[in-house]
Amino acid sequence: MYLMSSSCLDTIYSHVSIREYLEEDIPSSDLDKILRASQRAPSGWNLQPYTIIVVKNTEKKKKLADLLGGQNHIANSSVFLVFIVDYAKIVNAVEEHGKSLTPLLSHFAEALIDIGISAGWAALVAESLGYGVTFIAVYEDPCRVAEILETPKYTIPVLGLTIGKPREKPRKRPRQPLDQLTDIDTYSDYRSKAKSVLEVYGDKADRVFNYIFSRNKYYDKAHRNILECLSTTGFRTTY
Ligand SMILES: Cc1cc2nc3c(=O)[nH]c(=O)nc-3n(C[C@H](O)[C@H](O)[C@H](O)COP(=O)(O)O)c2cc1C
């Protein structure tokens, strides 16, 4: 069936995001392996303050693709995993225990890190099974994604992962050189690191920086939406 990579390292070193997929369902045995990898990921305090919504429904994938900037690879993927920061279950567990809890920004941050690891492990297992993946930023407008997924108070969708059999073979995208990405014992020189940041983008730097960092564009909107969503879903963002 699918080609298994010969080793974990091969899988990791040949990673490339895939944005075009064959129209194929993912066998439930493979999906199960991928989700079990997420489940096995470490978690701060072992709290596991997240839920993974496995979006299989075509209409729902299309709705999410449209909402997240017309990203067709969400609609065309075999399955779209959405990782939700989930303090609804934690608040409920604490209340069942006779206490109360208002989740804080710091709880949200912890969940983000857990989700990053959990989603990363899912991606690696998917790739080792011969699937292609792409992470999807869901944090741009999390509460509208929450509406589609009908998530309750104290939950915020933050990260997506498209999975499917690749219909393209992109070239590997560059990374900052290892000697710039890593330092031994103390931080070295941000100016030479900055050079390698620019080298990765080459002549696309202007377009990318303009898109990401201009006022009122992507990150301004995301900043506002995340803060709003945190407070409307019940997180405490002030000290
Ligand atoms: C947190 C995160 C969010 C991302 N969001 C998106 C996204 O919304 N859409 C997309 O097409 N790719 C997204 N990507 C994929 C990156 O664009 C991709 O990893 C990067 O350009 C490097 O390419 P490569 O993965 O092929 O090496 C995201 C990756 C990460 C880690």
Image (spheres, rainbow, N blue to C red):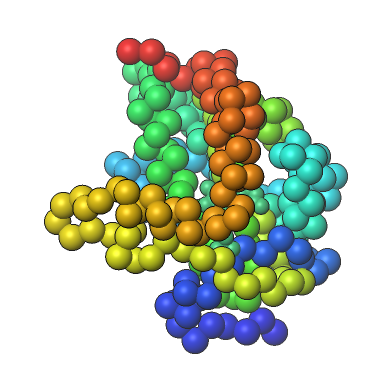
Indicate the quadrant where residue 169 lies.
bottom right
Q: Position of residue 83 (x, y in %)?
A: 56, 44
Q: Position of residue 128 (x, y in %)?
A: 55, 75
Q: Is residue 208 left or right of residue 90?
A: right
Percent x, y of residue 238: 38, 13
On the rendered image, what quadrant is the C terminus found in? top left
Residue at image point 68% right, 52% down: 80
The answer to which of 210 and 61 lies nearer the viewer is 210
Q: Nearer the viewer, residue 53 or 144?
A: 144
Where residue 100 appears, as percent x and y from the top left, is 37, 16
Q: Looking at the rendering, which quadrant does residue 232 occupy?
A: top right
Q: Residue at x 42, y 61 (%)?
A: 176
Q: Is residue 199 left or right of residue 187?
A: right
Q: Say whether residue 239 is visible.
A: yes
Residue at 16% over, 52% down: 186
Q: Is residue 122 above or below residue 27?
A: above
Q: Would you identify the image quadrant in which residue 156 lies?
A: top right
Q: Would residue 189 be found to the left or right of residue 73 on screen?
A: left
Give the camera-side residue of 137 and 231. 137
Quadrant position of the N terminus in the picture? bottom right
Q: Is residue 93 visible?
A: no
The correct choice, above or below, for 181 with respect to 3 in the image is above
